[in-house]
Amino acid sequence: MGSPTDRVIRAVTEDGSFRVIALRTTDMVRDGIRIHGLSGPEARLFGELLTASVLTRETMSPGHRVQVVFSGEGGGSMVADTYPDDGLTRGLVSRPAEVDRVRLGPSSLLKVIRVLPRGPHQSVVEAGSDGVSGAMMSYLQVSEQVTATLGVATVMDGDRVVASGGYVVQLLPECHQGPLMVMTERLVEFAFLDDLLLRHDGDAEVLLYELLFGFPYERVAEAPLVYGCPCSEERALGAVTTLGAEELTKAVATGEILELTCEYCNHVWKIPPEQIRTLLMPH
C-alpha cells in the first residue's frame, strides 16, 4: 500500500444516523503555503482555512464553488476558494504594510460565500477563540441549520507542514439516542485531531474508518484534492482589456510584452504585442 494522497471521502451510515466527510489536505496545504511564503502560526491558519473551505463545500454544495474569507485581528485577510471541478482549491493572503502577519483573535470574522445558480449566498460568523473549526461549525449550525461536528488541523514542525486534514460528522433526522451516544463518545478522541493526523499521515480512509468504527456505512463519493487555480490565458487577456485602448496601443507600438501575475498561484501570464493587437480590433 502506497503513501496516502490528498482526497475527500463522503459516507453515510446504513441506519441513516450520520453523514461523515473525511479528507487529507497535506500536499494541497504544503503547496499553498510554499506559493505564498507563509510560516509559523500564519501558515497553520492558512492551511486550516483551505481545509475548512473544502469541508464546507462538500457538506453544503458539493457541485458548486465555495469561498471562505477570513478577516484577521488587527488587519489582513485570507481567502480560500474551492471548486467542484478537478478538486481545485486555491488561496490568497493580503496584508497592509503595517501588518506583519494575519492573526486569529477576538475580533476575527469568517465570511462564507456559496456560489449557487440563483446567485451567491453569504454568511458571516465570528472566528475568535474557537478558531477555524469552531467558526465553521457555528456557520453550519447558525446559518445553514446543519447540526454537525467539524474539525480541521494543520500540524506544523517549525515551518514545515507535517500533516493536514479534517472531518465533518453531520447528525441526520433518523438518528436515535443509542448511535448518538456512541458517536458522542467517539468524537472525544477526535478533539485531539493533531495526534490522529500524525499517527496516520492524515489518511482520509483511516479517519473515516475510525470515525465510523462499528457503524456499517456506504461510501457515496470520493474525489482527489489539489492546490490549483483556474486562471487561464483567456482570463489574463480579459484582465488586460481593463487597461484601456490608449495603454494597449502604446504597448503594441513599443513591442512591450505585458505580464500579469496571478495572486492565487503566482503563475505569470505573458501577453505579446500580437495578442494585444487582436484586443484592439473592432468586434
Image (cartoon, grey):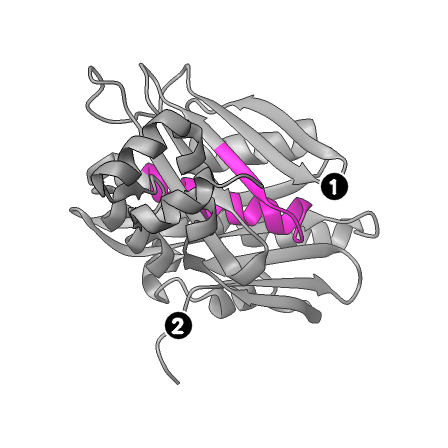
Gap between marks 2 and 1, in whole Å? Answer: 35 Å
Left or right of 30? Residue 114 is right
Image: 61 above or below 104: below
Compared to residue 43, the image places residue 208 above or below, namely below
Q: Quadrant of the C terminus?
A: top right
Pick the front one: 114 or 151: 114
User: Which quadrant, please, contains the N terminus?
Assistant: bottom left
- Tell me which residue sits at (23%, 26%) in the image: 101
Residue 6 vertical position relative to residue 175 in the rendered view, above or below: below
Q: Is residue 113 left or right of residue 237?
A: right
Quarter assignment of residue 123: top right
Q: Are marks 2 and 1 in contact (CB under 8 Å)?
A: no
Residue 87 location (% of width, % of height): 51, 59
**Residue 117 drawn at (x, y percent):** 74, 41
| SS label for mark 1 | loop
Asked if the stretch drawn in magenta spans residue 232, the answer is no
Task: Give me the residue at 36% from left, 22% from top.
Answer: 72
Residue at horizontal 66 percent and vertical 64 percent from the top: 11
Amino acid type at circle 2 is Pro
Q: Residues within 10 Å of mark 1 (few under 14, many from 20)?
A: few
Q: Nearer the viewer, residue 230 or 155?
A: 230
Main SS of the magenta segment? helix
Nearer to us: label 2 or label 1 = 1
Dot label at residue 117: 1
Which residue is label 2 attached to? 4
x 45%, y 48%: residue = 51
Q: Which one is nearer the viewer's eye here, 239 or 278?
A: 278
Q: Quadrant of residue 116?
A: top right
